[in-house]
Amino acid sequence: MTPAGSLLEARALRKAYGPTPALDGADFSIHPGEVVAVMGPSGSGKSTLLHCLAGIIRPDSGTVRYGPHTLTDLSDTHRSALRRTDFGFVFQFGQLVPELTCLENVALPLRLNGTRRKAAEHRARDWLERLEVDDVAAKRPGEISGGQGQRVAVARALAPQPRVVFADEPTGALDSLNGERVMGLLSDAARATGAAVVLVTHEPRVAAYADREVVVRDGVAREMAGAA
Amino acid sequence: MSIGHTLLGLLESGPRHGYDLKRAFDEHFGQDRPLHYGQVYSTMSRLLKNGLVEVDGVEAGAGPERKRYAITDAGVTDVAQWLARPEKPEPYLQSTLYTKVVLALMTGRDAAELLDGQRTEHLRLMRGLTERKRSGDLADQLICDHALFHLEADLRWLELTAARLDKLAAAVRG
């Protein structure tokens, strides 16, 4: 797919950690409602690409455009605000606040965006139901299984209705069955809400839930021809 | 897959006509490759000759005779032995893909591009299977999962080979 009409687009990203280049001229684009798998060997620059796209780190050079914004030109404060309102995140583990219940965890980003408690918890409960984990609403993360925790994390990422979800190895800590369940629910929910999903994974079976794949090798992202 | 053993196994639940056997086979195992009638009848004649099935009845009709087949004791033993015997794992040594990669390197072609093209094709198939799995019943899910795990193994090999292309090129070019 061409970058025309893309929601998020990166051009010629370069990022080095000391003398080691992590990204060496990477391009990327994603459209609304699209799920794109970012694949590649360990250390190829997949996660660095995701962090640059999400505005978590600033590339040494190159641009990231999100809608009308050029992320790479925005201040840290502005990028943080955009991440809170427009982006959702799912990581491999360790993302839920252990002191809060699952319901409070899902409501948290809504509360941070200024939604009142009752409305936030109402919406959080809806999302727990959609991810089929409403039965653990009152439990804390330490009291639930890894698969349930990951579905709670997906609910939390999607509850504020982000326009882009960044998922970095979201099933990496799960067994096959739980991993597939999380991927099915994540891709369905994202498509239903029109969110774009940038899915970093090294597992082909997880990537098969995406619409197309991009392979990062030696810091360069390659669109796979004819994969769309 | 051993069609003979599968048809024998289907007969264990009771005698069936050739047509019923084909239908049962296609329903359970023939999603991608339904049996031809010819295959059913040639297999049944072989099983008959080997004493693993017997003709339980013949219906005369307008067309050819319709034989009803029943499994014999020897047939039941044969199915039991087949089920108990582990399948020989197939390591696919010297696979077509390996041959293509080596030939590409030997002839100075772009082996990385070949691997990328194959990877795209594998993932395309995996996406189709994932879609089918998600809209299918449990049998569909299990059949698709089996294919998906094998394709995933191929993809891991493609990835590993891509990472070792320089070494492989040096080795094949001597």
Image (spheres, rainbow, N blue to C red):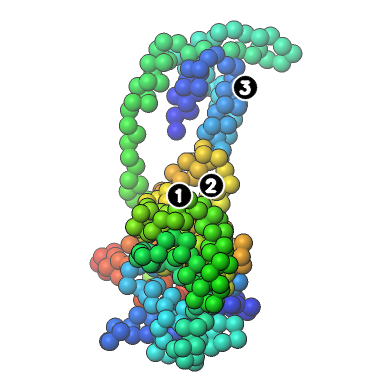
Label 1 resides on the chain identified as: B
Disc sitting over residue B133 in the figure = 2
Q: Kindly report the distance in space between the C-alpha atoms of the residues bearing marks 1 and 3.
A: 31 Å
In the image shown, does A103 or B103 lie closer to the viewer?
A103
Q: Kindly report the distance in space between the C-alpha atoms of the residues bearing marks 1 and 2.
A: 10 Å
Q: Position of residue B128 (x, y in %)?
A: 55, 53
The residue sitting at 58% across, 67% down in the picture is A119
Total marks placed: 3
The image quarter in which residue A192 lies: bottom right
Up-down: is A119 above or below B25?
A: below
* Residue at which label 1 appears: B148
Q: Kindly give the residue lying farthest to the top in the view shown.
A: B57
Q: Kindly report the distance in space between the C-alpha atoms of the residues bearing marks 2 and 3.
A: 28 Å
In the image shown, does A222 or A96 lie closer to the viewer?
A96
Crowdedness of circle 3 by 10 Å Cα count: few (<14), some, many (20+)? some
The image quarter in which residue A98 lies: bottom left
In the image shown, does A1 or A141 lie closer to the viewer?
A141
Instruction: Kindly tell me whether residue B168 is visible in this rendering.
Output: yes
Indicate the amino acid at tag 3: Tyr
Crowdedness of circle 1 by 10 Å Cα count: few (<14), some, many (20+)? many
The residue sitting at 54% across, 22% down in the picture is B42
Crowdedness of circle 2 by 10 Å Cα count: few (<14), some, many (20+)? some
Instruction: Kindly tell me whether residue B123 is visible in this rendering.
Output: no
Label 3 resides on the chain identified as: B
* Label 2 and label 3 in one chain: yes
* Residue at which label 3 appears: B19
Quadrant that contains the N terminus of chain A? bottom right
